[in-house]
Amino acid sequence: MAHEVTLIPGDGTGPELIEATRRVLEATGVELQWDRQEAGEDVYEAEGNPFPDRTLESLRRTKVGIKGPTTTPVGSGFRSVNVLLRKELDLYACIRPCKAYEGVRTRFPETDIVIVRENTEDLYAGIEYEEGTEDNARLRAFLAELGANVREDSGISIKPISIFGSERIVEHAFQYAKANDRRKVTAVHKANIMKFSDGLFLRTAREVAERHPDVEFEDRIVDNLCNQLVSRPGEYDVIVLPNPYGDIVSDLGAGMIGGLGLAPGGNIGTQAAVFEATHGSAPKYKGLNKVNPTALMLSGALMLRHLDEREAGDRVEAAIAEVIRKGERVTYDLKESRDDPSAVGTSEFADAVIEELS
Ligand code: NAD
């Protein structure tokens, strides 16, 4: 039976990246039925809404989507489509594998980690009180009653971390480790300083780990983790982190494997799963058939595995790895020099991957 998948091209370079990815996924022979839906800047300009209800309804129905990047205007305009998606579909786990493929220039060739980031809580929960407002003053007065004096000219962001949120993200990390033959889970925190938020995360992680004695478990303080990742990346495997640390360490991981063009992602929730690259819409390259589709294609491989098409997902990853290893038909960012005239375009990179698949 065909898998129905919501296909969201997004904006900027999104449509060309999605097209390249769609062709590769279809070349696996897995039957995929696409429900193409819009999100982002282009549909905002046409309809005044960057995230139409029909797109959300499609995702609720198919329960799985693949999405090109979408632009978020800075300061004004519309809210981030990704934040809306995360909230509406409770996409609580962000999975970001970072693997250094042979043929990519990196000082960290042994990197093969999977970052599991909590997506809904902590400092990114959006509970903020602007400096100079009445709510800010009321909150500071309340805190003063509790003996905590906050300077009058402070902006305040709240950092909620729950047992519920910590338990489900750490459990997800262990389930991912088991399903993907990973040997170890590392929980990351700053519990030495933030005893009641990060401390709760760590305590809960330890409790969850006890349920999974077949997977090794350890914890690291976040600053120490960053230091160790760049000195001994081979020692790390699945890494589970609260929201902001996960955000930052994801980009560190992307840098370690050779750049944003290579870093895939999946946002998994209780109602649906949406797969997309770590990078943004790279608007300056829009329509140029130039940027690297690897990150979105690898996100597609994650999607196939999520759909229980593991063998097809593994084949897509192996085909991409082979094209990169050969280093001939790759995009500009994977060449020794960025203006190497032998670099191919987005679409030709897809052709090379499809040839490897067949
Ligand atoms: P970006 O990731 O779009 O691009 C930054 C730079 O990284 C590009 O100029 C390019 O040099 C490089 N790059 C990115 N993707 C690449 C690829 N596939 N191949 C080769 N090189 C690549 O980051 P930005 O410029 O900060 O953001 C642009 C827009 O994208 C913003 O509006 C931002 O909000 C949005 N964004 C969206 C998502 C998403 O939809 N998931 C994620 C991040 C940023």
Image (cartoon, helix red, strand yellow):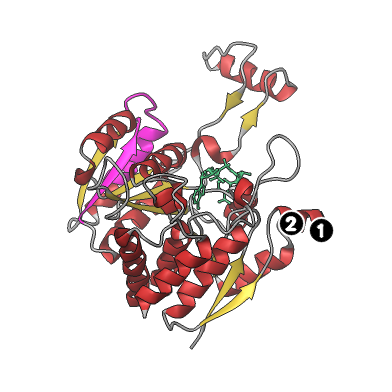
Quarter of image, res 144: top right
The residue carrying pointer 1 sits among few (fewer than 14), some (14 to 19) or many (20 or more) residues within 10 Å by Cα, namely: few
Q: Position of residue 237 (x, y in %)?
A: 25, 50
The segment highlighted magenta reads: 183-206
Q: Secondary structure at mark 2?
A: helix
Q: Position of residue 62 (x, y in %)?
A: 57, 74
Disc ID at residue 86: none
Disc ID at residue 42: 2
Q: Secondary structure at mark 1?
A: helix
Q: Name the residue tied to disc 1.
A: 46
- Say if 311 sits above or below 166 in the image: below
Identify the residue at horizontal 39%, vertical 76% (top origin).
355
Quarter of the picture containing the C terminus is bottom left
**Is residue 164 among the parts visible in the rendering?**
no
Q: Toward the viewer: 228 or 131?
A: 228
**Is residue 153 among the parts visible in the rendering?**
yes
Quarter of image, res 55: bottom right
Left-right relation of 156 to 2: right
The residue carrying pointer 2 sits among few (fewer than 14), some (14 to 19) or many (20 or more) residues within 10 Å by Cα, namely: some
Give, as a three-letter code, the residue at label 1: Ala
Q: Position of residue 351 (x, y in %)?
A: 46, 71
Identify the residue at horizontal 74%, vertical 56% (top origin).
42
Q: Residue furthest front?
A: 341
Q: Is residue 163 within the magenta segment?
A: no
Q: Position of residue 142 (x, y in %)?
A: 61, 20
Q: Is residue 200 within the magenta segment?
A: yes
- Structural distance between the alpha carbons of marks 1 and 2: 6 Å
Q: Is label 1 in contact with label 2 (beta carbons under 8 Å)?
A: yes
